[in-house]
Image (cartoon, rainbow, N blue to C red):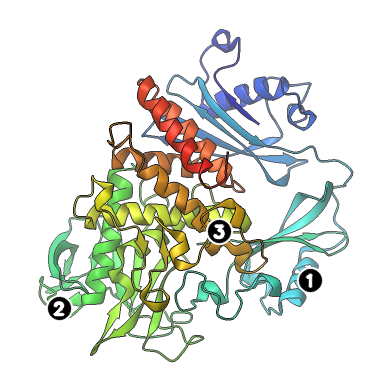
Amino acid sequence: MRGVGAPEGAEDRGAFNSAETAARFYLAEKLGRAEAPELRAAVREDRPERVPDLALRGARRQVGTGTTLVRFDQTQQEILVFGAEALVEIDESQRLVSIDCRLGEVSGVGSVPELSGNEALERVKAATGSTVDAEELPPPTLAYVSQDDHWHLAWHLRKVPAQLPESRREEGQRGHGLDPSPRDDFPLTGYLVDTHSGEILQSYGMAPTVSVPTRLEGDDEVSVHHRFRGSHRDSSYFLNDKWRQIATYDLDFADLAGAQLPDSTIGSSDADFGADHRAGVSAHVNAERVESFYRQQLNRDGIDDADMELVSAVNCTYRRHGAGPEWRNAVWWNGRMWYGQTSEGDRLVSLARHLGIIAHELTHGVIETSSNLVYQDQSGALNESLADTMGIIIANWYQAPDHADVRTWSWEIGADLGRDGLPLRDMSDPTRTGDPDHMRDYVHTTADNGGVHTNSNIHNKAMHLMLTSVDGAGKPLLTVEEWALLVYLALVRLLTQSGFEDMRQALRDVTNTYLAGNTAACTATLAAVDDAYRRIGIA
């Protein structure tokens, strides 16, 4: 259910004492008048002013729109209803802007499990061949799950490092198009196991001290000389920006799956690192670029919006793939960035040189700590596409001949890293790399978490069409900064199981708010959004 605008009578209720109180009031008003019984059931009749079966997940203020997003999870008897949630957007005067709900009426199932959480884990271990111990995982929790129009009580197992055989990447399947990484071989997976029959109902991927800094400089992997921030200690200089909390380490070709980070970040006896640490300089500079874009252009406080430390490690290998020293990948895993390298001529060159790939991977961290899109089927493909979109925007922001003119942009992700010298993906023409660009060619598969790396290209095409849209005079409808802001604001207000159509609607919602004072621009932008999605088969 979606609703827009304050309900009648809201003005008579007086000021609310918190964003949560306002959101609960608007939910009660909207759900109480909803035609669907499962929505009305979310409001308890004896306390119509509250929505007691929705547990607050959190509230976040959106600087770009001046609104606050309040998220709730639906529960019944204090048990989570999986995938059922509500999002309420309110303005600075605590008036309703929009509501999104995915709610269910749980019936025909009890609240007492027959199997224990450990027994549920044993079913998953048997199905996947995993030997993981319960102590290595977050404690299992109960959840209600709807499947085939029937409700089940299930154990929710999270961050299990094993996939079902039918979900694993097939031999030769590209995924990102790079070498395998621990995220591929030990993908963290969520499982919902029926507490009575032991059936695995569903599995899904779970993707993926302020101090004064010292100015440093050095060469990156493509021989560009940069100035950047680090720290100074005991006559040495380090790639450790304590102001921005960006730290870069050298794993010295150890296996990232089992290695510990060194005691210290990459260091030099001189503030000019020269060409001695090209990989480290590339990773450090590009991490700073991504982090700065999110802070300065999108007003996000770091990757997790809570000032997390951004840790990178270069010169990594992954022994399950090979002895090294080559490992052709860069991956966000366990809350850090890990960079491999490839041979080019007489030296190894780090994948840290690819800003677009770094921005893509770090955006997975942004998604993980905001909308947390389930990494499966269409929501997983949307997860991948939004990481691609932000990766392209950020890379061109720093590297395009004229970042304000999308006609000068490169739309390739991982240039020359694909087969036969092609990029990994091309947002302007996904078919160039053999990927679909329309919903009629959507690939239905159990592999690769439902084809997330393939079907993401359909949504990529819509993003390209939208970002390059022009008015009747051939002029851009919005600036690059505005498009980036709208994509980001839509991204963080998605629900965990949102799909392509939900992203379209989220873009419409934030556009209506952002351009509320300019009717002509708002109308034209909404038309551009709708046209982009229509052209990929989403009306």
| Circle 2: residue type | Ala
Q: Quadrant of residue 339?
A: bottom left
> Which one is earlier in the sequence, the residue at label 1 or at label 3?
1
| Circle 3: residue type | Asn
Residue sitting at x 57%, y 27%: 23
> Which one is earlier in the sequence, the residue at label 2 or at label 3?
2
Q: Assign a secondary structure to mark 1.
A: helix
- Mark 1 or 2: in front is 2
CA gap between label 1 and label 3 equals 30 Å
The residue carrying pointer 1 sits among few (fewer than 14), some (14 to 19) or many (20 or more) residues within 10 Å by Cα, namely some
Q: Where in the figure is residue 471, as x and y percent of width and height?
A: 33, 33
- Residue 494, can we see it? no
Residue sitting at x 48%, y 82%: 258
Q: Which mark is residue 455?
A: 3
Q: Where in the figure is residue 290, as x and y percent of width and height?
A: 31, 56
Q: Nearer the viewer, residue 104 or 482?
A: 482
Q: Assign a secondary structure to mark 2.
A: loop
Where is mark 1, residue-wise? 123
Q: Which mark is residue 275?
A: 2
CA gap between label 1 and label 2 equals 53 Å
- Residue 171, can we see it? yes
> Which one is earlier in the sequence, the residue at label 1 or at label 2?
1
Q: Quadrant of residue 33?
A: top right
The residue carrying pointer 3 sits among few (fewer than 14), some (14 to 19) or many (20 or more) residues within 10 Å by Cα, namely many
- Mark 2 or 3: in front is 3
The image quadrant where one finds the N terminus is: top right
Left or right, residue 76 beside residue 441? right
Residue sitting at x 51%, y 86%: 320
Q: Where in the figure is residue 252, as x and y percent of width and height?
A: 32, 84
- Identify whether 490 is placed above or below 423: above
Q: Where in the figure is residue 296, as x and y percent of width and height?
A: 27, 44
